[in-house]
Image (tube, rainbow, N blue to C red):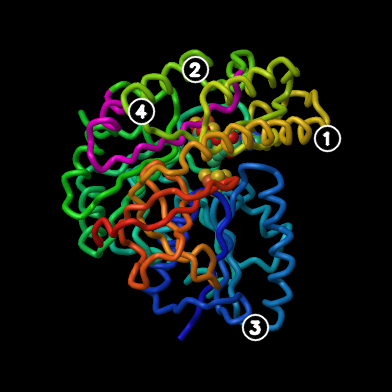
C-alpha cells in the first residue's frame, strides 16, 4: 500500500485543505505515514502570506530532496498559496519537485497525481470561480470534538499588503444546502463543534441568505452545540450578523476580528475600508449585546509610512478594545501587492522593536484579564491532552479560552463538556478544577 505525508503551514483554511487532500488520498488507496522518510508521496501545503513563510518552503524542499534521492519513485508536491504564487517557478527553483497545485485545485489531485506519474511533472493553477463543489464526506478530519467546514473560498478585498486575493482567487460561496448537509453529517458522526471557514467568512451569501441566516440554519441541526466562524472582515460585520451572535444559542461568544492598525491614516493606506471609530463601534455593540464576549485580532506593525504616533494609536486601541489574543506581524513586502511598490520607511530592527513593545502591552492587558477570571465557572469542551506525551487534559470555553484541567476524573474524554472553576491564570491560558461533568457529547 502506498503512503503519504502532508506538511501544513498557514491558516485554518490550509489545515482543512490538508484534511481534504488526505481524504482524497485515502480514496486512492493511500495510507498516512508518520514521516516523509516512509512516504511515497510528500505534499507541502504552503503559505505565502509573509516572505518568511514562503522562504521556509524552499528550505524545506532542500531537505526533502535528500530523502527523495534515497527513495526512488517518491513524488514531491507543492500545494497551497506558494504553489499558486510561484507556479512554474517552483520547478525552476526546485527541479526535483513533481507536482505544483494551487489551492483552488484540490479536487483535481487524482488526475494531477496520475499526470505526474505518467509525464514526470504536473502543474495545476486554474482558479475556479464556480461554487466550490466538494463532496462532504471526502475530508479526512482529525479526531476530536471540532470540525472545520468550508463555506467560501477566496477574497474580493484589496488590502494593499495582502497576497491572499492573488493566491486564493475571487470569492466563491458554497450553497447553504451543501453546508447544512455536511454539518449534519458531521453531527451524526459525533462532532459537537463546527467552525465555518472562509478568508472573508462574513461576506458569505447565497440568494437572500447571509451569514446570519446560515448560522440560524446550522443551529437547527441536532448535536451541534458550538458554532464558530472565521475570518471576519470588520466591513462585512453587519448588524444582523452581530444580532445572530447574540440570538443563536450555539454561536460561541468569541470573535476573531482583524483590525490591522489603530491609526486611520494607516487603515486608509492599507485600504481596509473602515475607520478606528467604526471598528471600535462594532466591538462596543457586541460587548453590550453579549457581555462575556471575547475578541481576538490581527495587527500589522511597520507598514510603510507608519510613524511612532500611528503605532501609539494601535497600542491605544489594544488598551481600549482589550483583546484576549493578538496575532501581530511585522509588515512583509509581498510580490504583486500595491504595498510592494511603496518605499519601506522603517528598518527591520525598528519593526521588531515595535512588535516587541506591542506584545508587552498586550501581555499586561491579558495578564489582568486572565487574573480576573480566577474563581469563575465556565463550560469547557475537552479537546485532548495538552501535549502528545502529557496526561494533562485541556479544553476550551465558548469564549475560546484554553483551560488546562487539574486532575479531572479518570473517565473524562475528548468531546466531554465539563463545568470547570478557574483556579489559576497563566500568560496565555488558564487552569481549572472540574466541578461537574456537564454532559457527554
Ligand atoms: N482575511 C483576514 C483579514 O482580512 O483580516 C486575514 C487574512 S491573512 C491570511 C492573516 C493575517 O496576516 C492578516 O490579518 C494580517 O494581519 C497578516 N498579513 C497579511 N499580509 C501581511 C503582510 N504582507 N505582512 C505582514 N502581515 C500580513
Ligand atoms: Fe487579505 Fe484583506 Fe482579503 Fe483579509 S480581507 S484576505 S487581509 S485582502
Ligand atoms: Fe497563508 Fe494562504 Fe492562508 S497565504 S494564511 S495559507 S490563505
| Residue 332 within the magenta-colored segment of the rendering | no
Mark 4 near ligand 1 (CB under 8 Å)?
Answer: no
* Residue in the picture at 44% in, 78% down: 30
Name which residue lies at 64% across and 26% down.
338
Disc 2: residue Cβ within 8 A of ligand 1's nearest atom: no
Secondary structure of residue under mark 3: loop
For ligand 1, give the image quadrant.
top right
Q: In the depicted view, which residue is nearer to us: 424 or 12?
A: 424
Instruction: Give the spatial CA distance, label 4 vs label 1.
Output: 39 Å
Name the quadrant of the C terminus: bottom left
Q: Earlier in the sequence, mark 3 or mark 4?
A: 3
Does the CB distance between marks 2 and 4 fall below 8 Å?
no
Boundaries of the magenta span: 240-262
Sequence order check: which comes first, mark 2 or mark 4? 2
411 to the left or right of 9 = left
Q: Residue at x 65, y 66 (%)?
A: 97
Q: Which image quadrant is residue 302 in?
A: top right
Q: Which residue is mark 1?
A: 349
Up-down relation of residue 289 to residue 366 (above or below)? above
Between 182 and 195, which is closer to the camera in this rendering?
195
x, y percent for residue 230: 42, 40
Residue under numbered circle 3: 72
Q: Quadrant of the N terminus?
A: bottom left
| Numbered disc in front, either 3 or 2 | 2
Marked residue nearer the N-terminal end (1 or 2): 2
Q: Position of residue 304 (x, y in %)?
A: 73, 23
Percent x, y of residue 107 = 39, 59
Mark 2 — residue? 274
Amino acid at each position: 500500500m502506498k503512503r503519504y505525508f502532508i506538511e501544513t503551514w498557514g491558516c485554518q483554511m490550509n489545515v482543512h485543505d490538508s484534511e481534504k487532500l488526505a481524504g482524497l488520498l485515502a480514496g486512492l488507496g493511500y495510507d498516512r505515514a508518520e514521516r516523509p522518510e516512509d512516504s511515497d508521496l510528500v505534499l507541502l501545503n504552503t503559505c505565502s502570506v509573509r516572505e518568511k513563510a514562503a522562504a521556509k518552503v524552499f528550505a524545506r524542499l532542500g531537505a526533502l530532496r535528500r530523502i527523495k534521492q534515497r527513495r526512488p519513485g517518491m513524488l514531491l508536491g507543492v500545494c497551497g498559496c506558494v504553489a499558486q504564487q510561484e507556479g512554474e517557478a517552483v520547478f525552476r527553483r526546485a527541479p526535483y519537485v513533481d507536482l505544483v497545485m494551487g489551492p483552488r485545485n484540490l479536487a483535481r489531485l487524482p488526475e494531477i497525481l496520475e499526470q505526474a506519474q505518467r509525464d514526470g511533472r504536473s502543474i495545476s493553477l486554474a482558479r475556479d470561480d464556480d461554487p466550490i463543489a466538494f463532496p462532504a464526506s471526502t475530508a479526512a478530519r482529525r479526531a476530536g470534538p471540532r470540525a472545520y467546514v468550508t463555506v467560501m473560498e477566496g477574497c474580493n478585498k484589496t488590502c494593499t499588503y495582502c497576497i491572499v486575493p492573488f493566491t486564493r482567487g475571487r470569492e466563491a460561496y458554497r450553497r447553504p444546502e451543501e453546508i447544512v448537509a455536511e454539518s449534519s453529517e458531521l453531527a451524526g458522526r459525533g462532532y459537537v463543534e463546527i467552525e465555518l471557514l472562509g478568508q472573508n467568512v462574513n461576506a458569505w451569501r447565497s440568494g437572500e441568505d447571509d451569514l446570519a441566516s446560515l448560522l440560524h440554519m446550522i443551529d437547527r441541526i441536532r448535536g451541534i452545540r458550538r458554532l464558530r466562524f472565521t475570518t471576519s472582515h470588520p466591513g462585512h460585520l453587519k448588524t444582523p450578523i452581530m444580532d445572530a451572535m447574540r440570538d443563536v444559542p450555539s454561536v460561541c461568544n468569541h470573535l476573531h476580528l482583524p483590525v490591522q492598525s489603530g491609526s486611520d491614516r494607516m487603515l486608509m493606506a492599507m485600504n481596509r475600508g473602515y475607520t478606528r471609530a467604526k471598528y471600535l463601534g462594532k466591538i462596543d455593540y457586541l460587548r453590550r449585546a453579549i457581555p462575556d464576549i471575547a475578541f481576538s485580532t490581527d495587527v500589522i506593525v511597520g507598514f510603510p509610512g507608519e510613524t511612532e504616533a500611528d503605532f501609539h494609536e494601535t497600542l491605544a486601541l489594544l488598551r481600549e478594545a482589550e483583546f484576549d489574543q493578538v496575532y501581530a506581524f511585522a509588515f512583509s513586502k509581498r510580490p504583486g501587492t500595491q504595498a510592494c511598490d511603496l518605499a519601506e520607511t522603517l528598518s527591520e530592527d525598528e519593526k521588531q522593536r515595535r512588535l516587541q513593545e506591542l506584545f508587552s502591552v498586550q501581555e499586561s492587558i491579558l495578564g489582568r484579564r486572565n487574573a480576573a477570571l480566577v474563581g469563575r465557572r465556565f463550560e469547557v469542551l475537552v479537546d485532548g491532552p495538552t501535549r502528545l506525551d502529557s496526561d494533562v487534559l485541556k479544553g476550551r470555553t465558548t469564549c475560546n479560552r484554553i483551560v488546562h484541567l487539574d486532575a479531572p476524573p479518570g473517565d473524562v474524554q475528548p468531546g466531554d463538556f465539563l463545568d470547570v472553576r478557574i483556579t489559576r491564570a497563566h500568560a496565555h491560558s488558564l487552569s481549572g478544577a472540574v466541578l461537574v461533568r456537564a454532559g457527554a457529547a
